[in-house]
Image (spheres, helix red, strand yellow):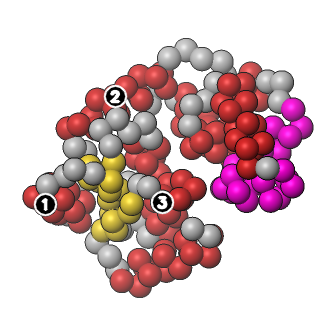
Amino acid sequence: MAPADIDEAVRQVREAKAGAVLLDSGLRNHDSLSVTTMVHEQVPETGIVVMGLLPHQDEIADFVRAGARGFIMREASLEEFFQTIRAVTEGGSALPRKLTASLFDEIARQRLPSPTLRDLRTADLTNRESQVLALIGEGLSNKEMAARLHVAIDTVKSHMQSLRNKLGLRTRLQIGAFARGDGERHLHSPR
């Protein structure tokens, strides 16, 4: 989704005075997290339900921090689907049992001792890796970064892998949080 599309989606949610928004976790370019964040920030009274998750989804905590209050597994029954929507529209939260272990695993990984982000910021990043890091923070897709930097998409992917290795981060969402400067709070806080 382009930023204008996200703005339009938020506008429609606001106008509809929706009790809940169903969001596909598989939006291209990781936009599902961006949409979750924008809806939560601009229409906080609307509950966000993320759908289509797999049992070992690694980014559940990222969605929770972004404002999601409910999750629906890909293989959820119709009854589970409606229970989740009902819980969220009534102001509650809903996390399928199968995702509980994933969430606890992710929280445990985040609490492991690791270098501070100040140390990570001084990692030996090349100029191009620093550029890619900044563009990830802006929310650009690999294709958009390749066009902006005038390189091949495979080159961008190579820089992404290098950033993961050098920064000790696992996901694109974590790299984006780090790039935006909110990574320390999200990645290493004891909360």
Q: Earlier in the sequence, mark 2 or mark 3?
A: 3
Name the amino acid type tagged 1: Leu
The answer to whether residue 87 is seen in the rendering is: no
Mark 3 and mark 1: Cα distance apart in space:
22 Å
For marks 2 and 3, give the one nearer the viewer.
Answer: 3
Read off the magenta span. 126-151
The quadrant of the image that shows the C terminus is top left
Q: Give the quarter of the image for residue 132.
A: top right
The quadrant of the image that shows the N terminus is bottom right
Q: Which residue was labeled with disc 3?
A: 27
Are discs 2 and 3 less than 8 Å apart at CB? no
Please give the label number shown on residue 104: 2
Residue 99 sits above or below residue 10 on the image: above
Residue 189 sits above or below residue 68 on the image: above
Q: Give the quarter of the image for residue 77.
A: bottom left
The structure residue drawn at horizontal position 73% and vertical position 36%, both measured from the top left corner, is 158
Near-viewer residue (118 or 97): 97
- Relative to residue 40, is residue 52 drawn left or right? left
* SS of the residue under disc 2: helix
Mark 2 and mark 3: Cα distance apart in space:
24 Å
Q: Which residue was labeled with disc 1?
A: 78
